Image (cartoon, rainbow, N blue to C red):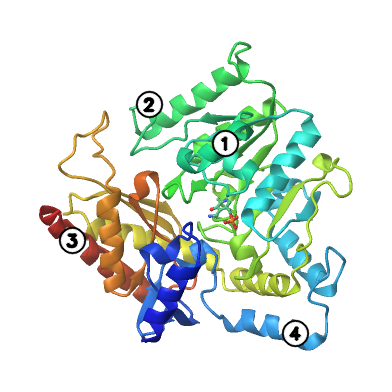
C-alpha cells in the first residue's frame, strides 16, 4: 500500500512540528481544478486549496503554460532581484489591479517567498519611515511564524518561546458579532471597538509608546474566518490617517479575489499605506511582496534583502493567475459563490446545535463548532468545541471533502475553495459538510 508507506516514512522522518498531515493523513499524487487525488485513488473536493493559495485550483492550464513558457525560454531560474521581462510583466499586471487606492504612486518590494517575510518587511518599513517602534495588532490575527510576524499574531502558545521580542506590540480587540470582546455583539460591539481604539490613541497615559503602524486583516483567516465590518475598517483608516500612523493591510490570504473583490480592503473603500501579498499572488508557487506608498520608501538599499526574491516561475504563474482572475471576473464569481455557500451552509446546519455560527466573506467561510451542553456566554454563544470540530473535519475527509480548522481552540471549520468552484460543486460542499456536522453530532453521546 503505497499511501501507507509514504505516510509512515513521513511520520518517522519529519518534524514533530508538521501540521496538516496530522489531521489529514493524505499522500497526494494528482491535482486538477478543485480536486485532489491521493495515492489510494480517492478523489477529494479540495476546500483547503494550499491554505487559500490556489485561486485557480490545481494545475490550471494557464498557469501550467506560463511555467512551461519560462522553462522553454532559457531564462535563468535564479535571478536575485535583477530585472527580467517576466518580472516586468508581473509587476505591470499587479500594479494594474491596485485600485486608485495607493494614490497611483506605489512601490513594490519583493521579499523572501513566504507571507511571513513580507510581513517582516512591512513592519520594518513603517518603523524606519516613522522612526517609531510600537505596532498595533489585533486579537485573533495571524501574520506568520517568523519572529516579527509572530509577535503581531494572536496565538499566545506559539508566541511564548519568543520571549522579549513581542514587547513592542499592543493588541486591540477585533470586532466580532458572535464572540464580541465587549459582550455586546452586533453593530454596537463594533462601535465600542472603535471608541476604545480612539480613546487609547489619544490618552497620554495609555501606556502605549508612539505608534509606528497598525496591522490588520480585513477578514481574519487563521483566526477563524472573521470578517471585519466595513464601518470598523473605515474607522481604523480614519483614526490612523488622522494621527500619521501607517496602516498595513495583510492581504496574504484575502488577496486576489478571494473575498469577492480583488483586494478585501476594497469592500470598505479604504486606502491602506502598505499591502502585504503572498499565497495566490504566486499562482501556487512561492512569492511574497509588499506594495506601499512611495513616501514610505525611505529605507536604505539592502534594508530587506534575501537570496530568493526573484522566483521567475512564480512570477509567471502569478501573472497568469492575475490575468485569469481579472478576465474571468473571478472576484465577482467568488462573491456570488461565497453567498451561495454561506446561505447553503446556514440552511443545512440550521437544525444542528453544534453549528454555532456560519460566517465569512466571499470564498472565505467558517463554521464555528460549539458544545451544545456548555454554558452560553453574555451574548448567548456556546463554548467553542475544538474536539468536536476535529471529528467534523474527519467526517468531511470520509466524505471526500478537505477542510481546514482554525480559530480559537481550532473550533472553526474553514472553507477556502479555489475561486473557480462551480455552483454545483458548492452544493456538494454544503451537502458533505452538513452531513459531517450531523454525523459528528451523533458521536457526541459516545465521547
Ligand atoms: N498573513 C496571513 C493573513 C496569513 O493567512 C498567513 C498564512 N496563513 C501569513 C501571513 C503567513 O504566510 P506564510 O505561511 O506564507 O508565511
Is the residue indicated by label 1 positioned so its CB lies within 8 Å of ligand 1? no
Q: Where is residue 401 in the image (x, y as percent from the top left)?
A: 34, 71
Counting residues from the start of the chain, the first of labels 3 and 2 encountered is 2
Pointer 1 local density, CA inside 10 Å: few below 14, some 14–19, many at least 20: some
Spatial CA span between label 1 and label 3: 39 Å
Mark 1, secondary structure of its residue: helix
User: Are circles 3 and 4 on residues that touch, CB within 8 Å?
Assistant: no
Circle number at residue 182: 2
Residue pictured at 18% horizontal, 49% vertical: 353
Residue ID at (82%, 45%): 294
| Residue at horizontal 57 percent and vertical 36 percent from the top | 234
**Which residue is under mark 4?**
71
Secondary structure category for the residue under label 3:
helix
Residue 234 - label:
1
Residue 438 - label: 3
Q: How far apart are marks 1 and 2 (CA)?
A: 20 Å
Give how far apart the Cα atoms at labels 2 and 4 are: 55 Å
Residue 426 sits in quarter:
bottom left
Q: Distance between the residues labelled 4 and 1?
A: 44 Å
Amino acid at each position: 500500500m503505497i499511501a501507507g508507506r509514504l505516510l509512515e516514512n513521513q511520520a518517522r522522518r519529519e518534524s514533530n512540528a508538521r501540521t496538516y498531515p496530522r489531521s489529514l493523513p493524505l499522500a497526494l499524487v494528482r491535482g486538477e481544478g478543485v480536486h485532489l487525488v491521493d495515492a489510494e485513488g480517492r478523489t477529494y473536493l479540495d476546500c483547503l486549496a494550499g491554505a487559500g493559495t490556489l485561486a485557480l485550483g490545481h494545475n490550471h492550464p494557464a498557469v501550467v503554460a506560463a511555467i512551461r513558457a519560462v522553462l522553454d525560454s532559457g531564462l535563468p531560474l535564479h535571478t536575485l532581484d535583477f530585472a527580467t521581462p517576466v518580472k516586468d510583466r508581473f509587476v505591470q499586471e499587479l500594479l494594474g489591479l491596485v485600485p486608485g487606492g495607493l494614490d497611483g504612486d506605489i512601490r513594490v518590494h519583493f521579499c523572501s517567498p513566504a507571507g511571513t517575510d513580507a510581513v517582516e518587511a512591512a513592519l520594518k518599513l513603517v518603523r524606519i519611515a516613522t522612526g517609531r517602534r510600537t505596532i498595533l495588532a489585533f486579537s485573533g490575527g495571524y501574520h506568520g511564524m517568523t519572529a516579527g510576524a509572530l509577535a503581531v499574531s494572536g496565538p499566545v502558545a506559539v508566541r511564548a518561546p519568543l520571549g522579549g521580542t513581542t514587547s513592542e506590540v499592543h493588541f486591540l480587540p477585533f470586532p466580532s458579532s458572535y464572540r464580541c470582546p465587549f459582550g455586546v455583539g452586533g453593530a454596537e460591539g463594533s462601535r465600542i471597538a472603535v471608541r476604545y481604539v480612539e480613546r487609547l490613541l489619544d490618552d497620554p497615559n495609555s501606556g502605549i509608546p508612539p505608534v509606528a503602524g497598525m496591522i490588520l486583516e480585513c477578514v481574519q483567516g487563521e483566526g477563524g474566518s472573521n470578517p471585519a465590518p466595513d464601518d470598523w475598517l473605515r474607522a481604523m483608516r480614519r483614526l490612523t490617517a488622522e494621527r500619521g500612523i501607517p496602516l498595513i493591510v495583510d492581504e496574504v490570504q484575502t488577496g486576489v479575489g478571494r473575498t469577492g473583490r480583488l483586494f478585501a480592503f476594497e469592500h470598505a473603500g479604504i486606502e491602506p499605506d502598505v499591502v502585504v501579498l503572498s499565497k495566490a499572488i504566486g499562482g501556487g508557487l512561492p512569492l511574497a511582496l509588499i506594495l506601499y506608498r512611495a513616501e514610505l520608501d525611505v529605507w536604505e538599499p539592502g534594508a530587506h534583502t534575501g537570496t530568493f526574491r526573484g522566483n521567475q516561475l512564480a512570477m509567471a504563474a502569478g501573472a497568469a493567475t492575475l490575468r485569469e482572475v481579472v478576465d474571468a471576473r473571478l472576484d465577482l464569481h467568488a462573491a456570488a459563490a461565497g453567498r451561495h455557500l454561506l446561505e447553503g451552509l446556514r440552511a443545512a446546519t440550521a437544525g444542528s446545535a453544534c453549528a454555532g455560527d456560519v460566517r465569512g466573506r466571499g470564498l472565505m467561510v467558517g463554521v464555528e463548532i460549539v458544545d451544545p451542553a456548555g454554558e452560553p456566554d453574555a451574548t448567548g454563544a456556546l463554548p467553542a468545541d475544538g474536539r468536536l470540530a476535529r471529528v467534523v473535519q474527519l467526517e468531511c475527509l470520509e466524505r471526500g471533502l478537505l477542510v481546514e480548522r482554525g480559530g480559537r481552540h481550532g473550533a472553526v471549520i474553514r472553507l477556502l475553495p479555489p475561486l473557480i468552484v462551480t455552483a454545483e460543486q458548492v452544493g456538494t460542499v454544503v451537502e458533505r459538510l452538513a452531513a459531517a456536522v450531523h454525523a459528528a453530532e451523533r458521536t457526541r453521546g459516545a465521547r
